[in-house]
Amino acid sequence: MTNSVPSSDIKPEQEFDSDAVRNANPLRFAEEIRISAPFKLENGGILPEIRIVYETYGKLNTAKNNVILVCHALSGDSHAAAHSPDDDPGWWDILIGPGKPLDTNKYFVICSNCLGGCRGTTGPDSINPETGHRYGMDFPEITIGDIVEVQRLLLDNLGIDKLLCVIGGSLGGANALEWTIRYPARVVSAIPLASGAHLTSQALAFDIVARNAIHSDPNFHEGKYHEKGTVPADGLAIARMLGHITYLSRDGMMKKFGSARNHGRDIKTKFETKFSVGSYLAHQGDKFVERFDANSYLVLSTALDNFNLGETPEELQEALRNTTCRWLILSFSTDWLFPPFLSREITDALLAVGKRVNYCNIQSECGHDAFLLSNDFAYYGEMIRSFIDNTAYEQAAGTPPPFVRPDRLDYDLILDLFPKNASVLDLGCGRGGLLARLRQQNNDNIIGIEVKEKYVLSCIQRGIDVVQADLNEGLNMFADGQFDFVVLSKTLQTVLDVEFVLDEMLRVGKRCIVSFPNLGYKDYRKRLCEEGLAPNPDAGDSVHEWYKTQNVRFLTLTDFEEFCRMKNIQIYNRIALDTKKHQPVNENPNENADMIITVISERVKET
């Protein structure tokens, strides 16, 4: 459910439901433009004219550089948010409005009903001016590219040359991707959510069955049901029920329906209601028929099914190579319509061709519809807010946003090891303190890897590019020698497979910086030998007590140096620190230093 509706007003069958407040009421604030010239489609068809219905929020500034284009999903429309307290709620009220992540006090937000839709923009239920009848099944096949071209025509007519951001989920995410490829110079940043470069075969199968349900309805009449005065209600409802299953998740459905499995609601419907999940789906199907057109469902689902930027990493890299925008890519852990690996494919392809990209897989029980719901909004909403605000700040000021410098002696010393404008990959980057300092030096060629969702959010809030990933799984998204430096700062003790991770670092980086707490330090020895207590390098931080710590090993400076000798790793530089006294250590560092910083690389093999 969204913030626009009190929880007490949500009926049981509407929980976890992004459609809870949707209806077919007239769009009071919608505007339109008409393009009277013929519009040529990618697959060869021609539309004699185009009508585009859209809604706007906020004000366009003088520079026209505060524009955010919102792209809706298959069943969406231009009404993304309410315009006033007495307006009907929109499908993304949670995100759009004063003080919200797409802050209409700052940004000019545009959302148009896409080509092929049924809420005003030219689609199958529109009148064909050449025949005087609705297009119906005669409406030509369209592509995601055609949808983007119509959006481009809208922006051209509004005098808007550049988008601060293009954002959308599901089919809207495909639109956002297409925008970055088709018009790279016009897009400053892009946020595809719960999307991918193509559908999985499983998702395609669901769409095929849904379309078959519509075609098989006796009231479909080969798409000419308007002329017959009928509605293929059963087929469209079944298509929606099937689709709605893919929008949910196993965990969410168990939570919602498990305790009342055999207690379906008594609602007026022709569909089965014996089980609670059945009455829920029946309600969704019947309600959908009230506001959506069957032919539009066929046209838009087919356009999404045909969307494919590449099946292989190489094809996807080539498709995205010329994009110039900054990226925030978000997936949701229980989404099985667009599983997280699809977002990782896009992320990896962008990393491989050197683009500025952020990625996070939001932990959620809400499935595909999570990007429309409030359940996980604290993370994904704030990531969107920070990403757009920082992008706008950089665009206006030409510099990274300011930040509070953490008091870390090891950061000060590590920064001194980097030449100017060095490319840097920071593994286990935490809240991004080291990279934030580099960004303040206007170094754009930096990125962090972090597994914790809350730290990914912190990095994005600081304007740091970060990818959520487990470094224990390797760095296969990066090429050999891609970075001047790869950093592993105070993280080595948490690594599961030290040899594997260091091998990956040495492959990806020309030089590597590894820092770690030295358990040979005299105070740690004393604590263990004299007091019988486990060493705690993070004393005073309760989350690092021995029974909570993420440290999986203890090592000393001597251990590490011996490891490097065995593995033929060259130590170019070594800095030993007493962080309590805030000073370097030169004498007997294995005993007197509690922190070690090393610069390493593979030895050149003799020929």
Image (tube, helix red, strand yellow):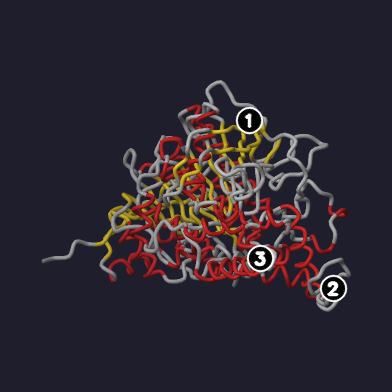
Q: Which residue lies under the disc numbered 2? A: 264
Front one among 232 and 107: 232
Decide which of 597, 203 is in the foreground and name it: 203
**Please, what secondary structure does the residue beneath circle 2 have?**
loop
The answer, for residue 582, to whether it is visible in the render is no
Instruction: Kindly identify the amino acid type of the residue bearing the numbered disc 3.
Output: Ala
Q: CA distance from mark 1 to mark 3?
A: 39 Å
The correct choice, above or below, for 231 with respect to 327 in the image is below
Q: What separation in Å lies between label 3 and label 2 (alpha carbons)?
A: 20 Å
Query: Residue 577: x percent and y percent?
Result: 43, 51
Q: Earlier in the sequence, mark 1 or mark 3?
A: 1
| Residue type of the residue flagged with mark 2 | Gly
| Circle 1 residue | 106
Query: Which of disc 2 and disc 3 is earlier in sequence?
Result: 3
Q: Residues within 10 Å of mark 2 (few under 14, many from 20)?
A: some
Q: Residue at x 83, y 77 (%)?
A: 274
Q: Quadrant of the N terminus?
A: bottom right
Residue that lies at the very extreme toward the left in this rendered image: 607
Dot 1 lies on which element?
A: loop
Instruction: Report the residue at 83% width, 67% height from top.
Output: 269
> In the rendered image, which quarter is residue 154 located in?
top right
Residue at label 3?
239
Q: Of discs 2 and 1, which sits in the foreground?
A: 2
